[in-house]
Amino acid sequence: MIRQWPSPAKLNLFLYITDRREDGYHLLQTLFQFLDYGDTLTIDPRQDDRIHLLTPVDGVPDEQNLIVRAARLLQRYCDERGLQTAPRGADISIDKRLPMGGGLGGGSSNAATVLVALNELWRCGLGDDQLAALGLRLGADVPVFVRGHAAFAEGIGERLQPAEPQEKWYLVAHPGVGIPTPVIFGDPELKRNTPVRSLSELLQAPYANDCEPIARKRFREVEQLLSWLLEYAPSRLTGTGACVFAEFDTEIAARQVLNQAPEWLCGFVARGVNVSPLHRIRSGRFES
């Protein structure tokens, strides 16, 4: 039985905002790719129905923690449908490496890993379509982590099309500040009318992130970090920030830049992968 489950980071290789709905949600086009780097969840089934998070986050009550919420959501879903009569509890701990509020999808990835792992450990028998639908209740980015393949996303991020971007090496850096998503999406200067384009068109165009100008304007730390990285390689914001990434063709090139980074830069080197590390450890029918 698998006890330790990867919860990988993601990058938005590009992100364009094409419109805003009447309910305030923004419509976007973005390209997700995973990293071979992230958190690790240790999950042990219990002989009762209790969900116990052994590593709580200071200031985040269990009812708000996506790990606990995902486990309880799957519990209720299975109970309502009578999918299993055995106890469905779990002890869960996390080795947290991804910064909160960094734009790397850490919380969404954690939720997806819980759904995927407990579906197998509890033998619920749900397919990826069902798990992705559950994940969407927790956040727009959860489904892409559930499905486990690099994807082109549209709508509010829920419409996914598998994609095969180049698997490059990245230096990912955190500027030392958190950027609440509402700060970016609420800025009146945010570009919200980028033309809708096909995936083939977008793959041929230079990659960009419509949120980046706002992050650079509002957070001098992001501006400072990107200005430094751009001297060495193409670099962009991921998601709504705060993390930024520089792309390289080789691991050696990425590490050379990291090794000469100023002391204030906090970062790591990882490879972009189109199949999630989570899905690589699942049963044979999910491996590629």
Image: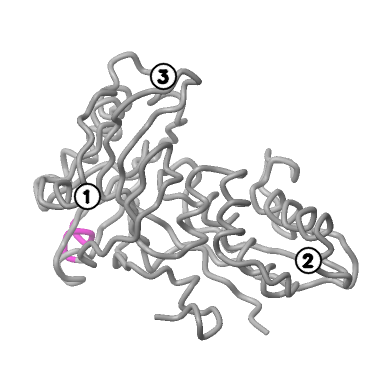
Indicate the position of residue 242 as horizontal and vertical percent values: 37, 39
Q: Is residue 228 visible?
A: yes
Q: Earlier in the sequence, mark 1 or mark 2?
A: 2
Q: Amino acid at mark 2?
A: Ala
Crowding around mark 2 (Cα neighbors within 10 Å: few <14, some 14 to 19, many 20+) is many
Identify residue type, mark 3.
Gly
Q: Nearer the viewer, residue 228 or 126?
A: 126
* Badge nearest the viewer, 1 or 2: 1
Tell us which disc is closer to us: 3 or 1.
Answer: 1
Residue 199's label in the rendered image is: 1
**Residue at 21% across, 45% down:** 198
- First along the sequence among labels 3 and 2: 2
> Magenta stretch containing residue 57, yes or no?
no
Cα distance in 3D space between marks 1 and 2: 40 Å
Identify the residue under disc 2: 90
| Numbered disc 1: secondary structure | helix
Query: Camera-side residue: 62 or 209?
Result: 209
Where are the magenta residues, as a range?
A: 256-260
Q: Main secondary structure of the magenta part?
A: helix
Q: How far apart are the alpha carbons under marks 3 and 2?
A: 38 Å
Give the residue number, with chain letter if any, for mark 3: 186
- Left or right, 83 with respect to 235, comes to right
